[in-house]
Image (cartoon, rainbow, N blue to C red):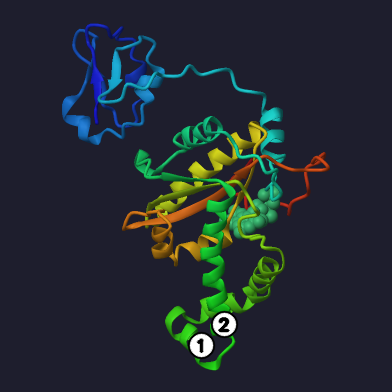
Amino acid sequence: MEILHDEEICLSCGSCVETCLRRNFQYDEHKKVQLIKNSVNNCLLCGHCLAVCPKDGALKLKGNNEELKKVLPPPSPEIIYNFIASRRSIRRFTSKIPTKEQIETLIDIGRYAPSGHNSQDFNFIVVFGHDKVKSIGKIALQFYEGLINRLNTFIGRQLIKIFAGNKTFNNLEKMEPRLRRHIAIYKETGSIEMVWDAPCLILIHGPDKHDSAINSSLAGYNIILQAHSMGLGTCILGLLREGLIRQVNQLNEIGIKIPGGNNIHMIICVGIPQLSSKYLKIPPRNSPNTTYYGTL
Ligand SMILES: Cc1cc2nc3c(=O)[nH]c(=O)nc-3n(C[C@H](O)[C@H](O)[C@H](O)COP(=O)(O)O)c2cc1C
């Protein structure tokens, strides 16, 4: 992909010259804006030039016909603060499934997350319906059940220490009561708390790299905030993710394919919140651990 510049339409206002972080635009000797062709490889395709250009059609992203949405005035900082702070992880849902349009809006906004070098290397898998979500939960639950069985034998414990290392072993020991509870609840009630009986999951996957994990998480948080604005409830499912990333073959068997070299970086459940009482207040948080340098 590359940026296309129509010099005939361009007003040469210089907004793109000012905004391009890679300095891909410059004025020629007649004060006409030029796109420096040999800089194209240096272009991040971030679209800032398109975003500031006042003249429709003067700049285009080759091969992309998406209509550019207009920027609306932002809400006040107080409203934004309250909106972000009032988001809660939701773990009880009605039996209704969010609509395809609602999920499409969530995925759409995920794309606007910042990503390193504008790589946008996040991909989304949407799992619709209680049965399918449950079958995914079961894969993770079975994985954890196997792990606990191994923790119960001397040889199993030694093997975990050898193959996973002492740190993972210690973490596992700490998690054991929680995992046992998940298994017991499933056996007693058929409910898988790892997925909170949600009607929909969004799995975000990308290359198995640290930066890509950050990119996917940011895309996920965009989704979470947008869902909050739409009255949908979400919860990040870290325990499910930890189980599933070790059971990719089983996921494959139920038709969910993660391309080789990719990892699942975030899983979010989505549904319509079922709350007998609404959240009226914002709960307290630890005071921030901040170190300031320089004079404020
Ligand atoms: C990386 C990560 C993993 C999480 N995993 C789970 C999970 O497996 N199950 C769950 O119910 N909540 C999970 N959560 C949600 C946290 O428990 C929740 O964000 C925290 O308790 C604060 O509550 P709040 O989100 O309502 O503000 C996870 C959150 C993060 C960021």
Residue that protrudes farthest toward the bottom in the picture: 154
Measured from the top left, where is residue 106 in percent x and y?
Answer: 53, 35
As shown in the figure, which amino acid type bears the numbered disc 1? Answer: Gly
Q: Is residue 4 visible?
A: yes
Q: Which residue has dot 2 on it?
A: 149
- Residue of label 1: 156
Q: Are marks 2 and 1 in contact (CB under 8 Å)?
A: yes
Q: Nearer the viewer, residue 15 or 54?
A: 54
Instruction: Check disc 1: other Cα within 10 Å, few if <14, some if 14-19, many if 20+.
Output: some
Q: Determine which quarter of the picture holds residue 21.
A: top left
- Tell me which corner region of the image, top left, top right, bottom left or bottom right, holds residue 66: top left
Q: Where residue 68 appears, x then y in whole percent?
A: 41, 19
- The reply to whether residue 289 is in sight is no
Quadrant location, the N terminus: top left
The answer to which of 257 and 223 lies nearer the viewer is 257
Q: What secondary structure is marked by label 2?
A: helix
